[in-house]
Amino acid sequence: MGLSSSAIARADDGLWYLDQFGVRDAHAQGLDGSGVTISVIDSPLVSDYPALSDANISYDTVPQSTRAPGGRSEGYDACYQNGQKIVASFKSGQAMDPDAPGDPIFITHGTEMTSRIVGNGKGYGSDPGFEGIAPRAAVKFFANSGGIGSGDVADNSCEGPDGSALGTDLATTGLGIARAVGAGARVVSMSFLTSVDADDYPGFLSALQHGVIMVSARDNSQEPGLPDMVGDPSRLTGLPGLVTVNSIGPSGPLAPSSDTTDGSVAILSPGNEVLIAPAMDTRVLDVANGGTSSAVANLSGMLTLALQKWPDATGNQIMQSLVANTRDSDGTATLDEGHERGFGVVDLTKLLAVDPTGYPDVNPILDQEVTRAAEHGETADMYDAQCAADSAQTTEYQFGDVTMKVPCQAGQFKQELVRQQDAWAAVQQCRADGGADCMRLSATNTAPAVSKQAGAVQAPAAPVRTSTHAGVWVAAATGALAVVAVATGGVILHRRRRSSH
């Protein structure tokens, strides 16, 4: 799609996407995220960063877990090191760890990503800050790496409050997702990379059951990903049902740092030539490549506006509209078979114009991944296995250049898809019979109750079977850290690392 000269001319301020993607127009219509809760999982926030001075944010840490003998993980609400609790936020000008002197911190990765969603545009002094896409949304923030007093959660050295070691086999991301679902989040924004195992699955499955939109990033590398959209149950990038994002700049091409094929990518979002914090010890922003992290935060903000505009739509219906109404589509979800651009570039204007409540309450990306996996010999049985929740059995799948070590519990993702499809069939039958309030039968509205305990989330109980329903992901509406790693990028913090600059 060609761009006007005025849109290109504004690119040098790093805020080009606010106009080009219709964000300012949405704000003029009164859409600002009000009434919608979004969760951000990232490194601790600088709580007094000016762009967040009037934001509605609650802070917590991602619960930690350790594998209990012979069974499932046990959840802990907090991580301690040397008797001090890891914190989720701290004041500007402090070092992340006062016992390890270093440069003062003014903008963390988590601060930047959160500000892209709910920032007010203010920076330190007279300098500009990040202007949020959904500034009045409520944010439930969960820190997944260390804050004042103790180093880094991601180094897997957490202790309990009594000083007892919590072990080295931490599975924290799924517990963070479970906590976000319990907090009422409609969107979860995750600008980091991590492996995923069976202990993480219950939290992700709970989000899928309740129609929570999970947004994650592909790597900032030119290393090709999967050759088709079959999902990757061993990594956050490509985990079944998540919206995996790649980054574009003002003229439309993929950002040079991630310009490659990747079958996990579902949506392209603005992240190149944007305002960034070039280092955590700086107060002044720059215009540069914000990477896939920035693209995730920006897409999460746009989805928040869509949820505000369409309060009666489920998260799955918003996702159906997202993939069907991109800049690259004509109202029908069409996947780039070259596997470089997913379903295309997010189009906020279409998301706000097209009523999504006629779309199926079925996660279109989960549908796509389970369906396509079955079509390839290498991955044909990846979602068919059944096993006990505490089984350690894994199977290695080689697809293209990607090796996936998949837990046998990955079959639960197919079970959840079948549950959603069966529920939608019940909605359609109810409507055909002239019933009232048929959406009460949909997958989101029949999801199991959310447990308030971080680690106690129920996985789907239905047996695995082959669905007899045609795929609905293309249906049209019918009736309607080590601390320095964040700044420098590319450093693996055991299981978890940031995905941007």
Image (tube, grey):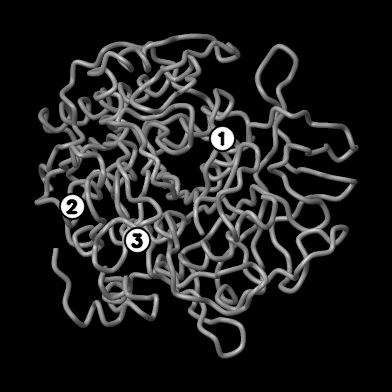
Would you say the residues marked 3 and 1 are in contact, meaning their CB atoms lie under 8 Å apart?
no
Give the percent coordinates (x, y) of residue 167. 77, 28
Residues packed near mark 2 inside 10 Å, few (<14), some (14 to 19) or many (20 plus):
many
Name of the residue lying farthest toward the bottom: 126
Residue 375 in the figure: left or right of residue 105: left
The residue beneath circle 3 is: 302
Q: Secondary structure at mark 3?
A: helix
Q: Quadrant of residue 214?
A: top left
Amino acid, disc 3: Met
Mark earlier in primary sequence (1, 2) = 1
Q: Which residue is mark 2?
A: 325
Give how far apart the Cα atoms at labels 1 and 2 are: 30 Å
Are the two marked residues, 1 and 2, in contact with CB atoms closer than 8 angstroms?
A: no
Q: Is residue 441 visible?
A: no
Identify the amino acid type marked 1.
Gly
Which amino acid is tagged 2? Asn
Q: Label 3 neighbourhood size at 10 Å, few (<14), some (14-19), many (20+)?
A: many
Asked if residue 183 lies left or right of residue 239, the reply is right
Q: Position of residue 477 (x, y in %)?
A: 13, 44
Task: Compare marks 3 and 1 and give the one earlier in the sequence.
Answer: 1
Q: Specify the label residue 174 is tagged with.
A: 1
Q: Quadrant of residue 241?
A: top left
